[in-house]
Image (spheres, rainbow, N blue to C red):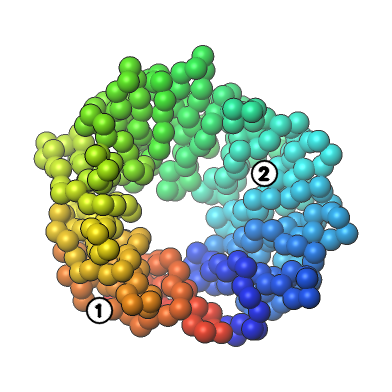
Amino acid sequence: MGLHVPPAPSIQLIFSKHGGGVAYSAEINDKSYVVHNGRAGKQYDAVGAIALSPDGRRIAYGALDAGKWRMVADNIEGAAFSTVKSPLFSPDGNHLAYQALSGEKWYLVVDTTPNPGTNKRFLDHQFSGDSRHIAYIDDADEKNRGRLVISDLAFARQAIITSGAIGMTMNRSGSRIAAITVRDNRQHIVECSFDRPDAIKTGPTYTEIHDPAFAPDGFALAYGAERDGRRILVFNDREEILPVGGSLVEPPVVRPDQKGVGSIISLNNQATFHQFFSDEGKVERSYDEANGLIYSSDGSAHAYAARKDNNWFVVVNGVDGASFDRVISPKFSPNGKYLVYRARKDGKRFVVVAKKTGKIIRQHPSYEQVFDVEFTADGKSVAYGVKDGQQLVWRVESL
């Protein structure tokens, strides 16, 4: 798919998850507008964050006109508010949720239906994977603690899961949710499913909890925690102490076979891969930076981006790959045979395809900008958006 871009400075530029659409905002004569799939929308005094449905066919963004903000969905202006923010489409693309301020009261709006509202802020909102429910944290106080609520999309049936929630995490399928909850200056994890919000699981208590992450199975959960001055990695309520002085660089990653939990640890100003809850007890060499840890589908290989001095490369099972000026977002193919990542070299940006071992097979053509890489449904090709001069193109390339 190729779309001509008028020669206007881009403020925001996004591709939809599955490549069916692209949008950007621009300015002309002190007015802002949004272009969706090559069609320019109405000019406004300002526009907010843009959201695209997963298939790219639908678009939403906040727009300021005559001192009032409205959510514009598919070129239709919604109700007037003091502020609108955080547009989000449901996974099936049929519903839109956003936060809105009217007077001194905040509302969560799904399509055109607002919830009862709160005098305090919303922290977050997320649709369930089947697009039938929505979870949100509202009534947030000055310490960013609020209520976690699961509701139907008409706000007719709402279940308060917990108070004191400071953040929520969903599993990959969007069927289960976990929230860090504060009570009496201590923290614990509260979990439940969207279908059974009454079946609540409460985890152990710690001084602090951070970076919760679900396993690929959607049930097992790992996270970082602190107790009595010790930093701990927790996995299904089991604990393993981090090296003295070490801390998590990013959320832990549970192996698909659940035979261990990998994490990038910061220790002595260096970043190191550690594998916890495993008989292998694997610890690899240290780098100046490291991030983006992933496992292959069978758990036999892991990879991450790392930097040593001015060189970036992908590390696969402890072996350094080819050097670039920058590499980001390594991903294994669904069958685990290939590894892809984005790279930059001498000002050129491109996608690299490698074998599972990290050995490069091919380097795709370079572009001005390269966006996140997805695998096609059959797992045989990679798809990604690029900006090439005045063209926005969705590329699909065979592995």
Depicted 305 relative to depicted 234: above or below: below
| Residue 355 visible, this orientation | no
Depicted 216 relative to depicted 184: above or below: below
Residue that mark 2 sits on:
153
Depicted 310 relative to depicted 188: above or below: below
Residue plotted at (60% across, 63% down): 52
Residue plotted at (66% across, 79% down): 8
Locate the C terminus by quadrant. Answer: bottom left
Q: Secondary structure at mark 2?
A: loop
Residue that mark 1 sits on:
362
Residue situated furthest right in the rendering: 66
Residue plotted at (53% across, 49% down): 130
366 or 198, which is in the foreground?
366
Residue 272, quarter of the rendered image: top left
89 or 26, which is in the foreground?
26
Question: Residue 368 at x, y = what percent?
Answer: 46, 78
Residue situated furthest top in the rendering: 184
Question: Residue 84 at x, y = what percent?
Answer: 73, 50
Please name the amino acid that badge 1 sits on.
Arg
- Front of the two marks 1 and 2: 1
Question: Residue 336 at x, y = what percent?
Answer: 23, 61
Q: Is residue 165 left or right of residue 112?
A: left
Question: Residue 246 at x, y = what percent?
Answer: 27, 34
| Residue 347 visible, this orientation | yes
Depicted 238 relative to depicted 246: above or below: above
Mark 1 crowd level (few <14, some 14–19, many ≥20, 10 Å Cα): few
Please name the amino acid that badge 2 sits on.
Leu
